[in-house]
Amino acid sequence: MRSFRPFRAPAFRRTLPAVLLTVLAVSAGAAFAGALPLAVTPAQADLGDVPAGSVGVLEFKVENSGDKAARVTYIFAECDCSFDLPAGGSIPAGGTFDFEAHYHLDEAEPGRWEEMITLLTDHPEQGEIRIPITAHVLPNGSGADTYPTGG
């Protein structure tokens, strides 16, 4: 009488897919972690408590850790903001690009305020950088008209 033995693939066939998946995941993680050459500081901004009707300035720095120059081609925002930008928007390899965002909370309702600043670049791996900005808007008349805030 024959005994029943369930089929088991040889050990290398059982472990090979797991090893390949692990190698791919580690490689992809290593390639992705830190692979994007453009980084913004601060990556997000929380203005804290801000009186309605306030205006202020946020300062940002874009750093290019890559080996090729990049260029900021366009900056736009969901908020009522204006921007002071260096001419050309170029960020040399290993260099930085500083800009200021002037925010205006004339239309902001009291409560939580959330907006987004978006930078478009000519970099093939990082065509867009998003910077969230939050605040707690206080009712009008609860503070100064100007509320400068650094980056």
Image: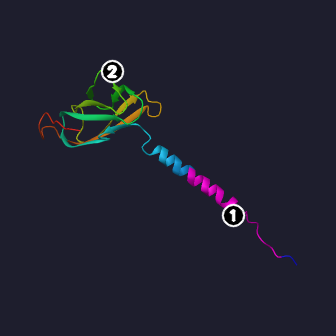
Give coordinates of residue 16: x percent, y percent: 65, 57
Q: Nearer the viewer, residue 26 or 101?
A: 26
Relative to residue 17, is residue 56 depicted above or below?
Answer: above
Badge 2: residue crowd in 10 Å (few <14, some 14–19, many ≥20): few
Q: Secondary structure at mark 2?
A: loop
First in sequence: mark 1 vs mark 2? 1
Residue type beneath disc 1: Ala
Q: Amino acid at mark 2?
A: Gly
Residue 37 is drawn in which quadrant? top left
Q: Which residue is mark 1?
A: 11
Residue 22 visible in image = yes
Res. 113 visible in picture: no
Q: Mark 2 sits on what residue?
A: 88
Quadrant for the C terminus, please: top left
**Which of 75/135 is in front?**
75
* Residue 11, image x, y percentages: 69, 64
Secondary element type, mark 1? helix
Q: Residue at horizontal 29%, vertical 35%?
A: 61
The part of the chain drawn in magenta is 3-23
Q: Would you identify the image quadrant in which residue 5 lies?
A: bottom right
